[in-house]
Amino acid sequence: MKRYVGIYIALGFAICALIFWNINSGSVELSLSEVWNIMVYRKGDETVMRIVWSIRLPRIMAALILGGALSVAGYLLQTYFSNPIAGPYILGVASSAKLTVALALIYTLNRGISITSGGMVAAAFIGSLIAMGFVLLISSRVRNMSMLIVCGVMIGYICSAITDFVITFANDANIVNLHNWSQGSFSGTTWENVRSMSILVLVVVLLTFCLSKPIGALSMGEGYAKSVGVNIIAVRISIILLSSLLSACVTAFAGPISFVGIAVPHLVKLMLKTSKPIVMIPGCFLGGAAIMLLCDGIARVCFAPTELAISSVTAILLVPVVLYMILRRNRQQ
């Protein structure tokens, strides 16, 4: 228990340090005293105040919330498929959500309608469920889990290709709005977006935490889960819906973000040295938040004022972790 609390505290300190770093750094660098006065006393240059409170802080909160959501979604999918390489990006869930959001955005923009945050999440959720339906259909016919991963990757490529096709033939104004989002970015996040995503993610993560015991029983095998009275069908449906909602929320607000949902649960499991859901779920959320804050800070700072796509940074940092997982799994077989 002391180990778990210690790691949670360490991750909390890391998140606080990364929040401060993200506030302080960027194309406009701030001194420690400026940050302190702005955050504590709300005093400072009006332009700098606007940069911090209207641009950087909403973005930081979005990275924190969505990073945690994506990590928890990855953990749920890995538990469902009993495969450490399963995740929203690999299984094509994120790409399918990206496609439906792109279609919804283009449809509304062409008609001069402003789509709400709820509308974007709903569109992404539909896309997530469609992809999950295909993956589940394939999983019922394919015994080899590596083949399932390959099929998920193919679904992702097809959805990405259709999205690129749609964006290519959209109006110029639509292309400007969609390009950065389709590459994965927290740029342009508002406090209204933060409020919407925080409510949805908080509710879903709390529901996931409440299902810790049934999920833990299911991870030990269907036979054991049945013996302790777990309704396997209900738990499986819950995992699909919850992971799809979390993936949809991330894709709707920030676009598809690669490898966080795969690598972070594995890293957290190595730190905690347990796979118990009641311990892993908060650990995954904190770990995902920390990793996403780090990657977003790198994306903003490295070539400022030019900003990198967040998926480019997460791929560079986390692909080695995924490769290690694949090699380790191969040695164990």
Image (cartoon, rainbow, N blue to C red):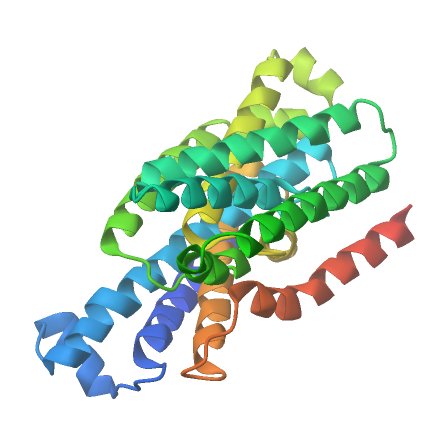
User: Which of the image's four quarters has the C terminus?
Assistant: top right
Q: Does residue 176 show up?
A: yes
Instruction: Kindly identify the residue that appears in the image at 36 percent across and 46 percent down.
Output: 109
Left or right of residue 55: residue 217: right
Instruction: Kindly identify the residue that appears in the image at 23 percent across and 74 percent down.
Output: 51
How far across and how far down the image is residue 199, in percent? Answer: 31, 39
Height in image: 229 above or below 175?
above
How far across and how far down the image is residue 19, in percent? Answer: 35, 69
Instruction: Kindly identify the residue that appears in the image at 56 percent across and 43 percent down.
Output: 99
Where residue 183 sits, quadrant-wise, is bottom right
Left or right of residue 123: residue 192: left
Q: Nearer the viewer, residue 200 or 212?
A: 200
Q: Nearer the viewer, residue 143 or 330?
A: 143
Where residue 325 sits, quadrant-wise, is bottom right
How far across and how far down the image is residue 163, in percent? Answer: 59, 48
Left or right of residue 100: residue 111: left
How far across and how far down the image is residue 165, in percent? Answer: 62, 51
